[in-house]
Amino acid sequence: MAEQGLPARTVERAIAEVLACLDPNGAPTSSLGLTPELAEYLRRAAMDASGWGRFTARVLGRPRFSPQDLKAWLGRLARGGTVDLDARDAENEWDVVATMSPRTRTALLDGMEPERFHQAVRVAAAVLQNTWLDADMYAQDEWGGPMTEETERSLFANLRALRAVAGDRLVQPEACELLHWVGYHYRDSPRHSPAEHVAYLDDLLTTTESLLGAEHHSTLRIQSELGEAHGRAGDNEAASALHERVLTNRRTTLGPNHPETLDAMGLLGGSRRATGQLDEAAELLERAVSGLRDSAGPTALELDRHRDALVDTYRDLGRADDALALRHEYVAAVEKRFGASHPMTLGARNELAATFAALRRRHDAEREYRAVLDIVADQDRPATSADPELVTEARKGLAELG
């Protein structure tokens, strides 16, 4: 039974449902940015609204929700809690900041219709994912600094609360992108070990496989991520076994030439290299690189990773000419597409220089590193945000040459 006086089918109720899925005790406030997902949810809720009339149409018809209107809505629904609004930036995008009492939260959860609750889970997951993404991106920016323990505790508290109220619905494909992002956080955060990342993904895989099945796209994606996590943790045998399972399923469900099948093939090739099976690794990586080059283009991100692994495998096998041919091919491809002074091209030349250096071709490596520095220093070339990193990489390479 919903709390007396709380509207059953209004825009106010739609916002309340989203807020109710986030933990008011995880932080002093729960912050919701007006993401496209949330805006769309509010619009859909307005179509079902009764007793809201012209005010609903007038507010939702605007390109932005005004602070006054949002404050009016939330002021009516957050009984027992407090509501405030803060400006985010000069473009007049706003954060809704609300603290909801446990009594109101319980009443909202108890009174939700199943489909509307599922909608709220999807939106709450998207909101929490965006919040987490922003926090991770801020921590990685040179002006941001590491994520504080308080911020991380707040994010995990909200995740626990959302998992508690959402149950199996959070694993459904529409919402589980949040759970993938948490895996990336475990992978990249200095506070968490590779073993913790493996444990998180292993638990998520068990849940997803039981609910969605062994061949579902989400299950295979988590298996692939778990394989990479095992590799980073040093368990290359486990990584290889998981990548082999994913490749077998991808071939069956998507066909041998699908980009995701080829990506799985490249990942298996990389794990085979890590276990010392170099000839099989080279064969798998060659097929993955060739297929991705044809299907996704010569500068696709997936192709970059497997091309790098194939270069390293060629070096391990003593196939220096093949390794260099692959690097030269990539430099030519990005230069043709972006131009000789583009950061992508300069990054490719730094990689070529590193390969020369690994093969003890000092003169060739020095030539490529200096070419990158000369192009960046050219006063007629517009500066880019990637220049400092390119310069640092080239100078570091030159220093290592001696």
Image: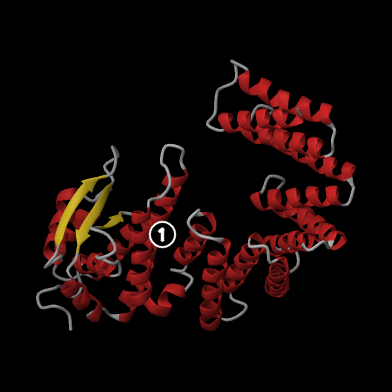
- Give above or below for 246 relative to 138: below
Q: Residue at x 58, y 33 (%)?
A: 389
Question: What's the amino acid at mark 1?
Answer: Gln
Given residues 208 and 230, the one toward you in this image is 230
**Left or right: 355 as drawn, with respect to 239:** right
Residue at (56, 29) in percent of width and height:
388
Q: Quadrant of residue 376?
A: top right
Is residue 394 visible to the viewer in this orientation of the structure? yes
* Label 1: element kind: helix
Q: Position of residue 105 (x, y in %)?
A: 21, 72
Residue positioned most to the top = 379
Left or right: 153 as drawn, with respect to 301 = left
Res. 332 in view: no
- Residue 20 in the image, given as x and y percentages of width and height: 26, 69
Give the image location of residue 263, x and y in percent.
Answer: 69, 60
Q: Residue at x 38, y 57 (%)?
A: 152
Left or right of 310, for residue 238? left
> Which colour assignment does the render follow?
secondary structure
In the picture, the quarter occupied by the N terminus is bottom left
Q: Quadrant of residue 52?
A: bottom left
Instruction: Give the labeled residue for mark 1.
Output: 129
Nearer the observer, 53 or 309: 309
154 to 168, vertically: above or below: above
**Which residue appears farthest toward the front when viewing the image?**
402
Judge whether 294 appears above or below 195 on screen: above
Look at the image and tell me in which quarter the C terminus lies: top right
Horizontal side of residue 17 vs 212, given as left or right: left
Report the residue at 80% width, 39% height from top: 358
Residue 161 percent location from the top left of the image:
33, 71
For label 1, the crowd category at 10 Å Cα-Cα, with few meaning under 14, some 14 to 19 and many 20 or more, is many
